[in-house]
Image (cartoon, rainbow, N blue to C red):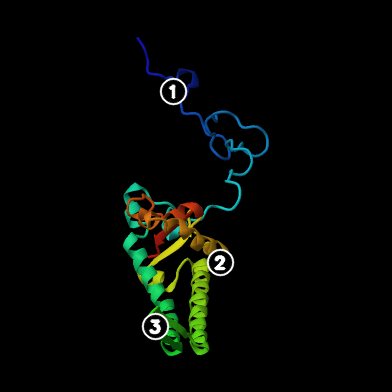
């Protein structure tokens, strides 16, 4: 016959369920870290040695005023200046220089011309005198100086900005193909002289009609292209 356990007897107490371990003092214990760090500061992730490598020299600028430098194949027709716009620019520049020079030429030939004194005999006609007077020669010389000075001025403008008044009117410019910058005065004069090659049967002047970069022979010799400025 069994008796109920005495509550005052510690040896007769029923077993207690296991209790959760008491947390230690301070912050709770953290789980074991993955890969114990070394002494000092935590290890930093590996980095590439040295500074990020960059290309040598100055970063390349975008050419020709277009985003991303050279255009892709689908943009070529909208990038280079058309043959018609180049012809229009040439005509405008020719009128700017040719009109004042032509006026002096015409006046010099008209006013300064002297009538020839001709005598007819049975053996034929002989003439003496005639030609252009001193005043006429002076006016013609002024016209020649206007043409020369105007040509040098056009070369100066194109060398500095890539544009003459005619090219500004049709929104095109002449630049170096390598970096998209104007040629400068000296190379612009050389390019003008290279147009002599274009003048052979005028093939060079017509070459931009079927050339991929719309270049004349002078452009190919000098490494230049005519592009749209806006």
Mark 1 or 3, nearer chain start: 1
| Residue beneath disc 3 | 121
Considering every residue shown, the one lying at the far right of the view is: 40
Is residue 22 shown above or below 228?
Answer: above
Dot 1 alpha-carbon crowd within 10 angstroms: few under 14, some 14 to 19, many 20 or more: few
User: In the displayed structure, would residue 92 be above or below residue 45?
Assistant: below
| Residue bearing the label numbered 1 | 16
Q: Residues within 10 Å of mark 2 (few under 14, many from 20)?
A: some
| Picture residue at 57% right of the left edge, 28% below the top | 35
* Residue drawn where x is 43% and y is 84% of the image: 109
Q: Position of residue 71 (x, y in %)?
A: 39, 51
Tell me if residue 81 comes above or below residue 115 in the rendering: above
Which x, y percent locates residue 49? Answer: 63, 38
Which element carries disc 2, helix, strand or loop? helix
Above or below, 162 relative to 42? below
Q: CA distance from mark 1 to mark 3?
A: 160 Å
Q: Which mark is residue 185?
A: 2
Tell me whether circle 1 and circle 3 mark residues in contact (CB < 8 Å).
Answer: no
Q: Nearer the viewer, residue 63 or 140?
A: 140
Distance (Cα) linking label 2 and label 1: 105 Å
Q: Residue at x 36, y 60 (%)?
A: 81
- Locate the N terminus by quadrant: top left
Q: Which part of the image, by quadrant, shows the C terminus?
A: bottom left
């Amino acid at each position: 016959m069994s008796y109920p356990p005495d509550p005052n007897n510690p040896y007769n107490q029923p077993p207690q369920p296991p209790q959760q371990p008491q947390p230690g003092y301070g912050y709770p214990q953290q789980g074991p870290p993955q890969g114990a760090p070394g002494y000092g500061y935590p290890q930093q992730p590996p980095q590439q040695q040295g500074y990020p490598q960059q290309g040598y020299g100055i970063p390349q600028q975008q050419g020709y005023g277009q985003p991303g430098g050279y255009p892709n194949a689908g943009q070529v027709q909208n990038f280079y200046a058309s043959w018609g716009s180049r012809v229009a620019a040439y005509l405008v520049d020719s009128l700017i220089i040719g009109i004042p020079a032509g006026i002096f030429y015409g006046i010099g030939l008209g006013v300064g011309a002297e009538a020839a004194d001709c005598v007819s005999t049975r053996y034929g006609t002989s003439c003496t005198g005639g030609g252009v007077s001193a005043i006429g020669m002076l006016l013609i010389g002024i016209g020649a100086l206007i043409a020369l000075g105007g040509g040098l001025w056009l070369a100066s403008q194109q060398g500095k900005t890539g544009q003459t008044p005619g090219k500004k009117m049709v929104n095109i410019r002449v630049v170096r193909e390598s970096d998209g910058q104007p040629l400068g005065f000296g190379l612009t004069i050389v390019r003008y002289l290279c147009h002599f090659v274009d003048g052979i049967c005028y093939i060079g002047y017509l070459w931009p009609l079927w050339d991929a970069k719309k270049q004349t022979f002078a452009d190919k010799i000098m490494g230049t292209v005519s592009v749209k400025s806006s």
